[in-house]
Structure formats: C-alpha cells, structure tokens
Amino acid sequence: MTESIIIGVSSCLLGEHVRYDGGHKHDRYITDTLGQYFRFLPVCPEVGCGLPIPRESMRLEGVPTNPRLITGRSRIDHTDQMLAFCMIKVKELDGADLCGFIFKKDSPSSGLFRVKVYNDGAAAKSGSGLFAAAVARNFPLLPMEEEGRLNDPHLRENFIERVFSYRRWKDFLASGPTLGKLVDFHTAHKLLMMAHSPEAYHSMGALVAHGKELPLVELFSRYEEMFMEGLTLHASTKKNTNVLQHMMGYFKKQLSPEEKTELLEVIGLYHDHLAPLLVPLTLLKHYVRKYDQQYLQGQAYLSPHPAQLMLRNHV
C-alpha cells in the first residue's frame, strides 16, 4: 500500500522555512510528484538540535571522517549539540518504518555526498553532513539520495525502485514469513535482480537453497542485506537487454516469425539507446496478458513502481 511508504526528507525541501537564512529550498518534484505516492517525515537537524531561525551559517572543518560543525563568523562549535540530537533522532527513526530518505545536498548537517570540509582554509568535497552520516551508519540498507541527484534519470529510477522494493520486503516480513514464502518472494524478484546484479541474484538463490540450515531470523537478515545491496547496483542497458531477451524466450512457441522480428527490433532499439525501456516492456507486457504467461505475471520487474512516475521513459 503506497500510503504506508514513508520516507524521511530534509524539511527545507518540503518548503518549510527552516534554513539558516529563514528561507527554504522547496523541491516541487518531491512534494508534487513523489508526494502522490509517499508520506514524508520531515527532519531539520539544525532546528531539531535547538538552533534558531534564522541563524549563523555553519560549515564542516577538520578531518573529513570526523569533522567539527563550526559557525563561520563567531567560530562556535556546535558538533556535540548536533551529535546529541543525532543519537536521539536515529532512535526515533528506528521505529518510523522508513523506506527511504532524501537529504539536502551540500548541507553540513544533511548533505550525504561530497560535502565541503575545510582544513587550514582549503575546502575538499570529501565529507557528509553529521546527521546524514548518522542515518547512513544506523540504517546501512535504507535507500538514501540527495535532492540534486534526483535530477539524473538513472539515479532517480534506482532510488525510487529501491524504496518500493524495500516496502515490498518489509511487507513480506510483516506477513508471517516462512521459508516457502521467501522462495516465492525470491522467485517474484528474479528478473528485477538479474537487471541489477546477476551475481547477487545467484548468491541470494544459494542462500535460499540452504535456508533450512539457518534460523529464519538469520536467513531473512542475510537475504535482506543481499537484496538491498544488490539493488544499489544500477540496472544497465546491457543487463536490461539480457532480461528482455530472457522474457522473450517464454513466448518462443506462441509468437509468429513476424512478431519475433518486431520484438527483437524494439529490444535492439532499446539496446542501441534509440528507445526507452518502456517500449520493449510494453510489447512484452502485451504478450504476457495475451498468452496468460503466469510466471511473468508474477515478476516485480514488469511493474516495480507506478507507471505514472515515468521512470522507464528516458533513453
């Protein structure tokens, strides 16, 4: 159920006036598009740790792996104050059933990647904001991204696909899971995993095959780690093409020579970056329905996220 998909979001991206200058960084894609499918849990760590609005701007200084949070003009060190907030907040988030988190890029508290860290006056884009780093440490499998990177269609698709996949996994865990149900889950995600990482899929298959040798809690924990880490690898054109050709094999007895030629042509157009993934998938979905292909009907790969998000429409 999409109403149960909760993602954390930096408050300023939702239009809240919480930035150091009293402004916001409202991201319409997040609120207007993703807001149709996700519920947001806003977090502004700087306000959350007790700093006022407006406030003096801050920056990270020192060692990138353990930087200090320092105000630019008055040189006040807010590191301990922020870290105390982070410790409390991650415990709260642990019970929030999060399926993802979108952070504000470049922020000394919330930036996830390549945040500037100053040392002897020189800045290196080598750090993470203190709060973002705490979330990443405590929830290593949680899908995370920065709002700026969501402008890249490949990064956007990968992040949102992981969010929906994590929700499906959490629903599986809440369903009274058994080894048999895990086999069904693994089967349903075969093509999706093959598009991201055939190696991960085969490793997951080996784990499931020896599932009787492990306590269920350990089995599910190890599977979750392999599932979510495998999905972080991007579904490349080459891997998607292999999956499309694999799907075509299920219709070798039904399709006419002309239909096979047409399907190979549209798969080739996708492979050559002349058509989006949506084109061959639409034709394959038609054959799945026409010939009532039960196995493929159960594949998450066909609809891993709502079509209205148009994540497979880019070339």
Image (tube, grey):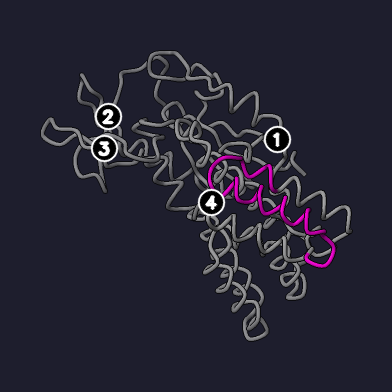
Residue depicted at 74% across the width and 41% down the height: 2
Circle 4 sits on which residue? 237
Question: Any mark on residue 254, and which?
Answer: none
Q: Amino acid at mark 3?
A: Lys
Camera-nearest residue between 252 and 314: 252
Q: Amino acid at mark 4?
A: Thr
Question: Can residue 299 be seen in the rendering of this structure?
Answer: yes
Q: Position of residue 187 (x, y in %)?
A: 72, 68
Gap in angstroms between the C-alphas marked 1 and 3: 33 Å
SS state under label 2 = strand
Compared to residue 69, the image places residue 280 above or below, namely below
Closer to the camera: disc 4 or disc 1? 4
First reached walking from the N terminus: tag 4 or tag 3: 3
Circles 4 and 2: CB distance less than 8 Å?
no
Residue farthest to the bottom, as pictured: 213
SS state under label 3 = strand
First reached walking from the N terminus: tag 4 or tag 2: 2
Residue depicted at 56% across the width and 23% down the height: 14
First reached walking from the N terminus: tag 4 or tag 1: 1
Circle 3 sits on which residue? 125
First reached walking from the N terminus: tag 2 or tag 1: 1
Q: Amino acid at mark 1?
A: Tyr
Quarter location, residue 85: top left
Q: Position of residue 298 (x, y in %)?
A: 79, 59
Range of residues picked out in magenta: 252-280
